[in-house]
Image: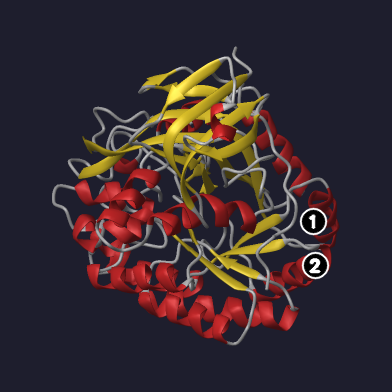
Amino acid sequence: MSTSTVIRGGLVITASDELHADVLMEDGRIAALAASGTPAAEAFTAERTVDATGKYVIPGGVDAHTHMELPFGGTFASDTFETGTRAAAWGGTTTIVDFAVQSVGHGLREGLDAWHAKAEGNCAIDYAFHMIVSDVNDETLKEMDLLVEEGVTSFKQFMAYPGVFYSDDGQILRAMQRSADNGGLIMMHAENGIAIDVLVEQALARGETDPRFHGEVRKALLEAEATHRAIRLAQVAGAPLYVVHVSATEAVAELARARDQGLNVFGETCPQYLFLSTANLAEPDFEGAKYVCSTPLRPREHQAALWRGLRTNDLQVVSTDHCPFCFTGQKELGRGDFSKIPNGLPGVENRMDLLHQAVLDGHITRRRWIEIACATPARMFGLYPKKGTVAPGADADVVIYDPAAEQVMSADTHHMNVDYSAYEGKRVTGRVETVFSRGVPVVTDREYTGHAGHGVYTPRSTCQYLT
């Protein structure tokens, strides 16, 4: 395998700059950049030269929210670490941060070890882990300190899913207090799960069983209420807070208010909330089940607030919450009872392309595209500047992107291990052409040249985005 490559003639786009530059990669790292056509660039020598004229040269995407092989609702997410990371590479993402799960009655270490066993030797791209904390007790809190020391520096808690992942306010406060001391970052699924369960029970009793009712019972006000509560608990604890998969106008308002007060509060949204809506949940013949996820899809009018939040930096990151379940045999578990539909959508392969389309549609700039998809997730979760930028010393995770290529998203052509596309038939402009992971071409001119086991586990430092 070549140990040095020079990419010539492309437009290098990072979160801060756009420059026609040549990029020299050596031994897995970016060795140098120089403006194209200058003597410094002409002096670059390498075993391989790639012509990127007319193309973008961008950092590999960092998807900070994926769920490969996640057990949920009596089944498992359909993408393994092998299939999921291969699909990520096809979509221009070169690092994922997945979620290891602590089960109630078990320790954090046991859950983390189980996820290491799932991923090790199977990933096409680099990976790291967050830790889902389902059972807060004295031992859990001690384990949080140990995990931070070894590079697992973020912990997810749930205000939803009573009886599964749910933590009450006292447990949340204790974990936040611990993270305030050890430098960890609490990630919050902010929905009032106790109230939602009441509404689910009432809807089913009325015979409201179709997928669209999943969105109707998980009300935007209950997302906003939980977001507000999480912010105030974090304020009491003196801890930073990252709210995952923000979907509602009212929740964005809570984040904006907290940030205006100078709090270290951050928000993530996902492509499904930017491009899909309750109209998808209401598709006939149980097709709406394909779009069941939590937080749920919202009416289309919520999208303007999400885009505005991304422009004003009240939302900092777009991740996928990639958690695919096949329509046949998995989503179908909820026929006749929407509450039994496994929650999750496929998307790890689509994120970079959808956000490029958002650039063309005028929602965000090119540099903001890279900021929310590459640089900020890397900074938020302690991976920067190793990941998330094209700069000397960074890992040579580089994507050559064709901004003019047109494609139609479809389950017939995607590489995720799921039998439908959430964006079936959607036409977008822009497509990944070649992907380097630590200098190794894993996608070459639209052919997969990677392999399971290339990706390595990547310990993280603490959040680099605090004010």
Q: Quadrant of the N terminus?
A: top right
Residue 354: percent from the left, percent from the top?
32, 48
Tell me if mark 2 has few (under 14), some (14-19) or many (20+) residues whose alpha carbon lies within 10 angstroms of its own.
Answer: many
Reply above or below: 239 against 209: below
Could you tell me which secondary element the residue under label 2 belongs to?
Answer: helix
CB contact under 8 Å: marks 2 and 1:
yes
Q: Where is residue 322? Give x, y as percent.
A: 44, 45
The residue indicated by pointer 1 is 144
Mark with earlier residue (2, 1): 1
**Which corner quadrant holds the C terminus?**
bottom right
Q: Nearer the viewer, residue 290 or 442?
A: 442
Whether residue 278 is visible to the viewer of this picture, yes or no, is yes
The quadrant holding residue 153 is: bottom right
Residue 241, quarter of picture: bottom right
Q: Is residue 408 left or right of residue 356?
A: left
* Towards the viewer: 364 or 178: 364
The residue labelled by disc 2 is 178
Vertical position of residue 79 compared to residue 364: above or below: above
